[in-house]
Image (cartoon, rainbow, N blue to C red):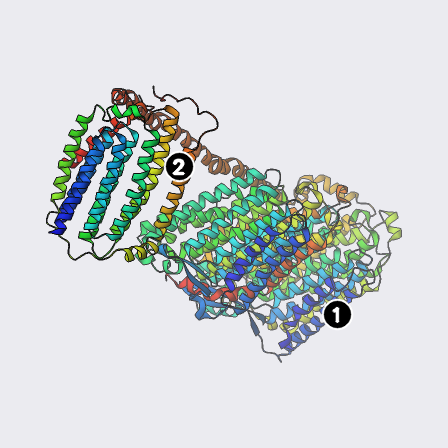
Amino acid sequence: MIHLLSLITFIPLVGALVVLCLPKDGRRPIEVVGLLATALPLVLSCWLYAAFDCSDAAGATMQFVERHAWIPSMNVQYYLGVDGLSGPLVILTALMSLIAMIASLGIKERFKEYVFWFLVLEVGMLGVFESLDFFLFYVFWELTLVPMYFLIGVWGGPQKEYAAIKFFLYTLTGSVFMLLAILALYFQADPHTFDMVALMKIHGSLSLKFQIIVFLGFYLGFAVKVPAFPFHTWLPLAHVEAPTAISVILAAVLLKMGVYGIMRVSYTMLPLGFEWFLPILVMIAVINIVYGALCAMAQTDMKKMVAYSSINHMGYCLLAIAGCSATGFSGSLLQMVNHGIITGALFLLVGVIYDRAHTRDITVFGGLATRVPVYAGFMSLACFASLGLPGLAGFVSEFLCFLGAFTRWKYHTAVAVVGILVTAAFFLRMIEKVFLGPLNNRWADLSDMNARELVSVVPLAILMVALGIWPKWALGMMNATMMHMAGLFK
Amino acid sequence: MIEHAFLIPLLPLAASFLILFGGPERKDSPLPYAGIAAIGLSLWISLRILFDAWSGALPLPYEADWSWFSFAAELRGRPFIFDMRAGVLIEGATAVMLAVVCLVSLLVQVYSLGYMHGDAKFKRYYAYLSFFTASMLGLVVSNNLLVTFACWELVGVSSYLLIGFWFEKTAPPYAAKKAFITTKLGDLGFFLALLTIFAYGGTFNIVRLRDAVAMGYLPELVLTLIGLGLLAGAMGKSAQWPLFIWLPDAMEGPTPVSALIHAATMVAAGIYLVARCYFIFAASQVAMDAVAWTGLITAFLAGTMALVPYDIKRVLAFSTVSQLGFMMCALGVGGYAAGLFHLTTHAFFKALLFLGAGSVIHAVHTNDMRQMGGLSKRMPVTFMTMTVGSLALAGIPPLAGFFSKDQILEKVFERSPFMFAVLALTACLTAFYTFRMVFLTFRGEERDTERFRHAEESGGVMTVPLVILAVLSVCSGWALEHAHAFARLVGSGPGLLPGAAGEAAHHIDPMVMATGVTGAAFLAIGLAYRLYCTPDLSAALAWKERLSLPFKVLEDRYGFDAFFLGLVDAADRLAGLCRWVDAEVVDRIFVDGWGLLCRIAAELSNLFDALFVDQAVDGCGYISRDVVGANLRWFSLRGRVQEYLLYLAVGVSLFSILR
Amino acid sequence: MIERLAFYSMAALTLGSAILVVTMRNTVHCALLLGLSLLGVAGVFATLGADFLFASQLLIYVGGIAVLMIFAVMLLGRTADLHLRQVNEAWMAALLVVAITLAGLVRLVKLVAGVTAPSPAAPATRPLGLLMMGDFAVPFELVSLVLLAALLGAVFFSRKEETPPPPATRGPSS
Amino acid sequence: MTLAHYLFLGSALFIVGIFGALTRRNVIGILMSVELMFNAANINLAAFNRFLAPAGVTGQAVALFIMTVAAAEVVVGLALVLMIYRARDTVYAEDINILRG
């Protein structure tokens, strides 16, 4: 109980080390260890969910805190903890990792290395959301980078090396600026500390100019991850080239790290800089939404389309944050969770058809609904969820996002609403071209989804419906913290 | 009974999931009957509510709600936990609407047993149908505008599924997509209206919002904007100008679906929304005028467009659009009860007409009226019931359409004689095109003997709903008009200030107006008889030759389709441009450009290195070897260690004394 | 008084034999005188009360190093060398330099003139042993390693090569 | 006896050692001179210990280390001399002039 977060974070690491020791040829043990090492954190995070204190009073505090001195000479601590902001993301990460691991079982070559890197990646992702010490945070943040580089670069598509190096350099450039910003905060604090909770309290002593500069540093780091216009161009490429499960992780978790950072760091530690940046941020958000949707509409590659739709959806998160209100923060966080689930499912499904048809070109399909009804059903469900159909997860969060932004940025929001329409247009067009109409005879012997694919998609589909009908399950965890956050600078 | 009102939408919802997941697709699957049973129960509940309300045993409005979810919200900088409550709000109009929707749904579902018999996706069809009904009923009863919007979207998606039901063909999916996107365009307005409502009103609850408006918390400009937003939503859903382009295409769906969704219920949702939020419109003259003019333009344009098509369902579709325009216009001029009255009667006779058309199509397997003719001999029941429906639509007394249309015209005249003139003209057009359809289909000689010989009257499951609807079309009008029962039930419009509606600018004797309009309608029917009730269509074709330009314009639907296609095209081009920009500009600038910058910096520093740093190193080497070294060489000429040691000692000795 | 006498006699012994060491022609004599000088140093240690150093000096220097020197001289020496000049031509310059250095050093030494011993000397063997096994354990071990390495190195260098060594190379900068 | 006496003795011995190292032609002679210098340093250390820090024995310990290192030095040095003698057949420093410029 005391070490719940450490357990969640480091079980995958133990799994990774065990995988390293296993023989290369025996596939079964590696699979079992990989699944166990991702399933256990999920079980524990369910425990975390059950034990999480949702009461209003708990909004301002970190829960499940673990705190030990690590490098005393630099005042670095091993400091983990979750609140209503990071808790849902930890659970999402654990869930999506298991799903992606199930989806990864189809990997044919160099499976052992794959599982190893995958588990290391999970450690990094979980750690980013849990750590409350900047040093630790940065370590975990960078820890996600290297496995991702290898996972894309080794198991990716035809342009994998280019995509991997582009991803790596892009995010590394961003995180270097972040590191500078972290150091700036460290040296500004008295006594010097990396403690994020303590740093949240010193903003009163920071001048506007300092805050702006440090904010920009952090923003560069986070914006690349989000990805916010104009730093988004690594995303479509990385998505297209990455193997299916990695696309899922990329979309479902990695992008969230950026928005999480903006909420956790930029907003709470640098309120003046944040406030100063808001007009720009809202413009970027609107561009992300409309421009991302339009770009998605022009794609013929399904995966690229979904990738651009991610840009569009993360734009909603940014827009909501720019609203700088409790509604906006709730909406943004809920949208992150929902987008993780929905887009994860979309990437999985695109991977399913790619495995069979070896193409993702929308225009070459047609009438598949008669051939693969189950697949068509799930795909349509995911698409509808993504375009914000009520009753499915996307609706409430998108609505909250817009609601949060509207009070402050009326015109921007009104423009951004167009994004909804375009999103609907390209998803429906994709459905029409791929599934409806007369069957293209080239695909007459396409097979429907197999058990493994169903196992990975069905939980997500259930969650989409469940969170759409009963968003309380997610919102209940967030409300108190969001209230606290919104009230910080009022 | 009223406390069970929340079950009305939930029963069909449960039924739809039961049907979808309850068993495999089989020819004799019993699951569709579950849907019929569920809607039957819902109908029973809503009829009980309606009669209780009518008899005065039930005080309206009735409201009950439950917490759905709560989120951290913020109003005027004050964060709080907002409790989103979903529930039911039953007013007079709601009770009527519930009964109408349930009744038509039940009849359509029964009818579909015959119409869709043998279809490969029979079970799925019923699941969709039940799902649609559930969403529609949810939209009607909800007391929360957000839930209304959610159901509104769900109605849209079930319409999408049903229009595209035969997705193996090319046209239905396209039509479905078009319908969804077009209505979604209107929904953006609804969406923005919701945002504005929350930002200024702080609630989605209709009753609380009404109180807030009544207290004057919301400025008029905001109310106008909200009203226009809601109107935009209604424009999409109710196929009002200029978003009416989707409805004729939506006829690609199965005909019972057209009857249910695109005639009686879903398209009425927009009208219902405006009626439900009438207090907002009533508070803003601009919004009211917008509603009225939208309705007027729609009624007239669609009425004219209905004159030319030969597809029987298209005629009915345009007619529907036109009648929806009537309702909208009525609401816009303050005729709250009149609009809802027409909504009710129209639901009956338009559903009847569509189901009748479905019966005909089922018999002859074509939509084209030019291949029909003389069918009255083969299908007497269908002919009789459709004639009743047509008379009702044309506004011939004493059928239902007469009463409701009469009320609308009366209200409109009070407001503006010009609007009245346009609407009266449209009413005549209605009579004309309705009977053009009837004559082309049922009278005259058979034009396609092959189809004619195979045409047979449909079976009982299809004709019984027709007869029931025909009876309703005959009696609902005067029954509801009797002693102003309907107006008493629904009231004169919530939020409409007393007296505002009463101050009519113009007055006309109701009897004179009714007689005049009816006479004109009869004239129009006569004209239709002259032109179309003939063995061949030469007279009509001759007119068409003579008026080719107007015909062309009407067949092109005034170019609205082309306009929206152009819009889509433009969006596509914009998307293409964005894609190009993304790949060629943004990526170039921020990736390749950055790389180039780094390369340039690297080259520069390399140059600097070679020119300065390296030269400095070389220079040091040069100085120490060739300048200093050469001159110091004699020191080490003999290579004796002890000499070096001596120099060292000299240094040490100097240090030791020079301090 | 006896202390003073001891110091001066030992100092004279040390310095005198040292000067002879660096000036005499016969290298064997030099080596022998070196032993004498080291013996003098041992005496100086004794006057300082450094009992363990005194013993070590006797054992290591007088008994070890000086004897080693004598062996080396005997091993390498040639009879002809006895008549060769053992001082090179720079001895004048060296003398000058040395004199200057001595002057500097004396100046420095004068800075501490008059410092007397605060207390009588105590036996140092026991504290030294504790120190070696305590604070200086690591240097102690290191020194033993150095010794071992020197031993091995000496053996390595001095063993006879099987193959004739390469001809002497000229300096690289000739 | 004062510290200055001992320091003067150390200085003198050191100077003699330097003089020897500078002037002896014989490499073994140079080595001997180096030994003298070592001893001078040792005298200084012992004297400092005695006069400035009588409580501890650290100075003597360092002197002891120096003795050890000197022993090692002598061993290696003589071995080297032996090598040079074998290679060049001489023990005179002026003949060992591979550093000649």
Quarter residue D43 falls in: top left
- How many numbered marks are there? 2
Looking at the rendering, in which quadrant would you find the C terminus of chain A?
A: bottom left
Q: Disc 2 on helix, strand or loop?
A: helix
Q: Is residue A54 left or right of residue B299?
A: left
Q: Which residue is mark 1?
A: B37
Q: Is the residue under label 2 in contact with that under label 1 (CB below 8 Å)?
A: no
What's the residue type where badge 2 is placed? Ala
Q: At x 52% / y 42%, what residue is drawn?
A: A167
Q: Nearer the viewer, residue B318 or A402?
A: A402
What's the residue type where badge 1 is placed? Ala
Q: Is residue C113 above or below residue A65?
A: above
Name the mark on residue C154.
2
Q: Is residue A14 above or below residue B41?
A: above
Regarding residue B226, the answer to whether it shows in the image is no
Q: Disc 1 on helix, strand or loop?
A: helix
Residue at mark 1 to residue at mark 2: CA–CA distance: 109 Å
> What x and y, as percent, mark residue B345?
68, 64
Kindly identify which chain the residue marked by label 1 belongs to. Answer: B
> What x and y, as percent, mark residue A297?
59, 44
